[in-house]
Image: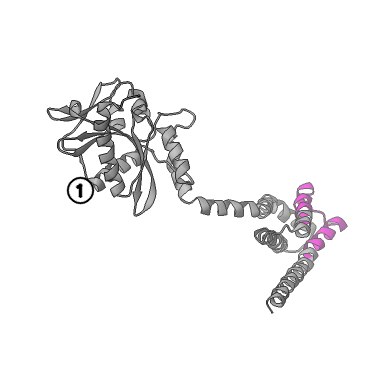
Amino acid sequence: MSTVRASRKIERAGVNALRSLLEEHDHIVQEIDGGNDHGEDMIVNFTRAGKRTPYWIAIQVKSGKKYKRAHGYAIPVEDHFEDWRQSRIPILGVVYDMKKRELFWVNLTDQLRSVDASPGWVQVAGTAQLNSESMDDFYAEVATYAGDERMRIRAANEEEALAEAVRARHGLDPSTAPNPLYEGLADLALRYEERLRAIRRNLLRSLPLQIVILLMLIAWPYQIRFVEGSSDMSPVLWVSNLYVFMIMMALTIFFEFRAGRIPYETGKWLWLIAGNFAWLPVMDSDGDPGWWGTFWIWAGVLVPSFGYKLLLITFIRFAMDRIRAQRAAGA
């Protein structure tokens, strides 16, 4: 029958004391199986006002007289130097003084990033006590460090966040290492993710409107020159009337998309009109005072005139039928 190591009781005393303290302040604690083999004993997700924060830490806990020093305490680095200093979440060291029943802590990742080689031991100040009175200051200091170093963990749920934190504690992975130039923008995007998704959907729906406006801007000087060379009509008035009609059609398409419908007919007519009136002045940029130019000038007057009426009649009638159906269903 296997025996339990005598040192296990001492080791567990520190882990239990720290876990109780953290959970007393509503922080989420997940112990790591075989933690001493990997260099940490637990992973902690800080909470504020009952809600999870994006700040996660891993903690190595030590208990017993051998970690006591004349001035404070010390934690052995052993073969964890690279893992602790390259971790993507802060690795903290905590020493439990069993005689005093007090906890003391140090930011191992921060300390080891300031040196090029393993110091063997990391000093823990005797003034760095961790208890109920210092918990708020402890959280503020670690969260500030994690924020400054871009060590946030964001995920859809706690399970995914924990999995990411477990991976992060093993050190920097070149394929997932943060790019400081874009990390802040990514945090901002995640904060407003739902709103950005809505904006993206509306941008896609407004694609016909964007294309029409771009075509109008490109074709504007050609349109003006074509009208000037084809008739005595005011070129700005003629072009503006045509453009307003095309914008109205594009807006109709946009709001149809928002309603969840695909406006096939409106779309076909818009591209037919836009294609003809955008192509014509480019191919015949100086205009035509003969029948050809006159035909297109009158087309540019009549198409919007009848188009407005047809557009209004079609969609107002559709809306009336829909409202009648709703009222009948509710009667």
Magenta stretch encompasses residue 292: yes
From the viewer's perspective, is 321 left or right of 205?
right
Magenta residues, start to end: 273-301
From the viewer's perspective, is 136 left or right of 243?
left
Image quadrant occupied by the N terminus: top left
From the viewer's perspective, is 255 left or right of 269?
left
Residue occupying image coordinates x 21% and y 37%: 104
Numbered marks: total:
1
In the depicted structure, whether residue 85 falls above or below residue 160:
above
In the depicted structure, whether residue 95 falls above or below residue 143:
above
Residue 74 at x, y percent in the picture: 21, 28
Give the prevailing secondary structure in the magenta stretch: helix
Amino acid under disc 1? Glu
Visible residue check, residue 62: no
From the viewer's perspective, is 280 left or right of 98?
right
In the depicted structure, whether residue 78 falls above or below residue 29:
above
Image quadrant occupied by the C terminus: bottom right
Residue 301 at x, y percent in the picture: 78, 65
Residue situated in front as seen by the camera: 106 or 23: 23
Helix, strand or loop at disc 1?
loop
Quadrant in the picture for residue 252? bottom right
Quadrant in the picture for residue 329? bottom right
Residue 113 at x, y percent in the picture: 31, 28
Magenta stretch encompasses residue 328: no
Visible residue check, residue 120: yes
